[in-house]
Image (tube, rainbow, N blue to C red):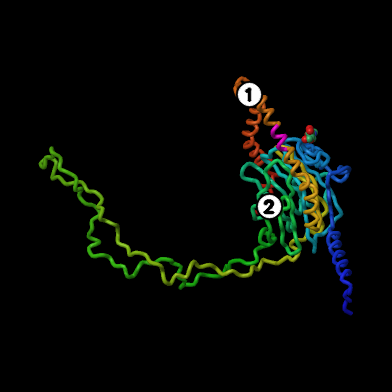
């Protein structure tokens, strides 16, 4: 009945090798998009906002700087526009599986305010109507706005409510490609990676408020009558010094002198003005000492929350079916590429290495070259000793930079309905 062990050790090695091959080969890829030929057949551009003429166009490009001009992605190409595009994959559930959601994003525009996140959606969705109000399951990726918001979003929908991650995860803010990875495991743990390096990890239970708290303060508990929570008490040994109460609060000013021309008859008897007595120390109080009976601050005991019901499938999204980008951008230039939804973090890591990892040094060199050129052009257009030129590039740049605050406001206030910072936080509250 026992499995017979192979006697030949070479068999063992073979078996071992086979097993590891199987382990790698077992990665299940639900969706992988490298934006090669035919990508337009897989992605549906939404009509959302097009009747208001505020739907932005995507540019199929490798960008102004890149490590491989043939490796293209999709880039937002118009300022002050909404973007919504999605792709469908065969519906699956991540029950008993690790869920890995990964993509690369490059903000070529020196992003002042805008998102670089993607969404996973479930069930049936009209992709032509996909927009800011379309319910989603997971929203993940970087978001930048002004100086205050530079973070990685990880918003999870649970029973129809969106929950923001409670931990701060800073995002990359430069103009180069970065890979963002979200891993959700069947043991309800998660990890957030940027460029294959773990930036945050923990539990769904502690880092989101998906469920009511497990333990609460006992609302029935009362502080016992004899609970002594005074840390310091008056020293019973301390005694008021004799004569303490006889010290006057004020005394006649010893330095005052009767004026030469004071006339007792006319002015009345002269008395020195009074001043505060430096000897006077206020009403007597015994000094304070540590209370030997101090029990500490009273806290209600924690009890099991009757409203808490564990959900062993807290991590499960049973009908994942779409991946999409839905953004508002003040300044365009965000380029998405290498979108992956799979069940294997190792596979995702390898894909990141083969794409971003392979190209990153060449991209950085191309970026540095582009920056150098830009600076040279600016210097040429803008000789230091010339102050007669009025409409040069640099001034335009400065004006743009100054505008960023105003643009931040546009994002925050003009589009509150589509602004995740107001919408989702509201949902939370
Ligand atoms: C698309 O991107 C390329 C590379 O950055 C750029 O040269 C081109 O002008 C862009 N096209 C549009 C329509 O924005």
Quarter that holds the C terminus: bottom right
- In this view, the residue in front, 16 or 153, is 16
Is residue 305 inside the magenta stretch?
no
The residue at which mark 2 appears reads as 427
Is residue 275 visible in this depiction of the protein? Answer: yes
The residue furthest left is 265
The residue at which mark 1 appears reads as 383
Q: Residue at x 79, y 37 (%)?
A: 57
Q: Earlier in the sequence, mark 1 or mark 2?
A: 1
Q: Which mark is residue 178?
A: none
The residue furthest bottom is 1
Q: Position of residue 129 (x, y in %)?
A: 81, 44
Residue 187 falls in image quadrant: bottom right
286 horizontally vs 395: left or right = left
Image mark count: 2
**Range covered by the magenta-colored residues:** 367-372
Q: Position of residue 293 (x, y in %)?
A: 43, 72
Residue 345 falls in image quadrant: bottom right
Is residue 221 shown above or below 89?
A: below
Residue 361 falls in image quadrant: top right
Is residue 371 inside the magenta stretch?
yes
């Amino acid at each position: 009945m026992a499995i017979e062990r192979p006697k030949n050790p070479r068999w063992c090695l073979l078996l071992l090798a086979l097993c590891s091959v199987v382990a790698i080969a077992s990665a299940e890829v639900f969706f992988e998009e490298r934006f090669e030929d035919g990508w337009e057949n897989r992605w549906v551009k939404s009509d959302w906002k097009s009747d208001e003429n505020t739907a932005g166009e995507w540019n199929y490009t490798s960008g102004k700087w890149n490590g491989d001009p043939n490796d293209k992605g999709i880039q937002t190409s118009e300022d002050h526009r909404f973007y919504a595009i999605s792709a469908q994959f065969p519906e699956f559930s991540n029950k008993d599986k690790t869920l890995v959601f990964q993509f690369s994003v490059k903000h070529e525009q020196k992003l002042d305010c805008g998102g670089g996140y993607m969404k996973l959606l479930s069930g049936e969705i009209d992709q032509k109507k996909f927009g800011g109000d379309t319910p989603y399951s997971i929203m993940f990726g970087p978001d930048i706005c002004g100086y205050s918001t530079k973070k990685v979003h990880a918003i999870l929908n649970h029973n129809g409510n969106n929950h923001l991650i409670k931990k701060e995860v800073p995002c990359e803010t430069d103009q180069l490609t970065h890979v963002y990875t979200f891993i959700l495991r069947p043991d309800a743990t998660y990890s957030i990676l940027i460029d294959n390096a773990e930036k945050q990890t923990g539990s769904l239970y502690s880092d989101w408020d998906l469920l009511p708290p497990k333990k609460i303060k006992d609302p029935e508990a009362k502080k016992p009558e004899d609970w002594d929570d005074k840390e310091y008490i008056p020293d019973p040994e301390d005694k008021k010094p004799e004569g303490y109460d006889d010290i006057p609060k004020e005394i006649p000013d010893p330095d005052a002198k009767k004026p030469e021309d004071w006339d007792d008859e006319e002015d009345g008897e002269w008395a020195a003005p009074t001043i505060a007595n430096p000897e006077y120390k206020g009403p007597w109080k015994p000094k304070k000492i540590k209370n030997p009976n101090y029990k500490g601050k009273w806290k209600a005991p924690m009890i099991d929350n009757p409203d808490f019901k564990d959900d062993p499938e807290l991590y499960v999204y049973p009908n994942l079916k779409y991946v999409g980008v839905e953004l508002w951008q003040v300044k365009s230039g965000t380029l998405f590429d290498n979108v992956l939804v799979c069940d294997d973090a190792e596979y995702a890591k390898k894909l990141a290495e083969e794409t971003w990892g392979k190209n990153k040094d060449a991209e950085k060199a191309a970026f540095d070259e582009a920056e150098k050129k830009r600076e040279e052009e600016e210097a040429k257009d803008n000789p230091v000793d010339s102050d007669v030129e009025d409409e040069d590039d640099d001034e335009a740049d400065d004006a743009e930079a100054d505008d960023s605050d105003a643009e931040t406001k546009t994002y925050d206030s003009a589009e509150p309905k589509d602004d995740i910072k107001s919408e989702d936080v509201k949902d939370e509250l």
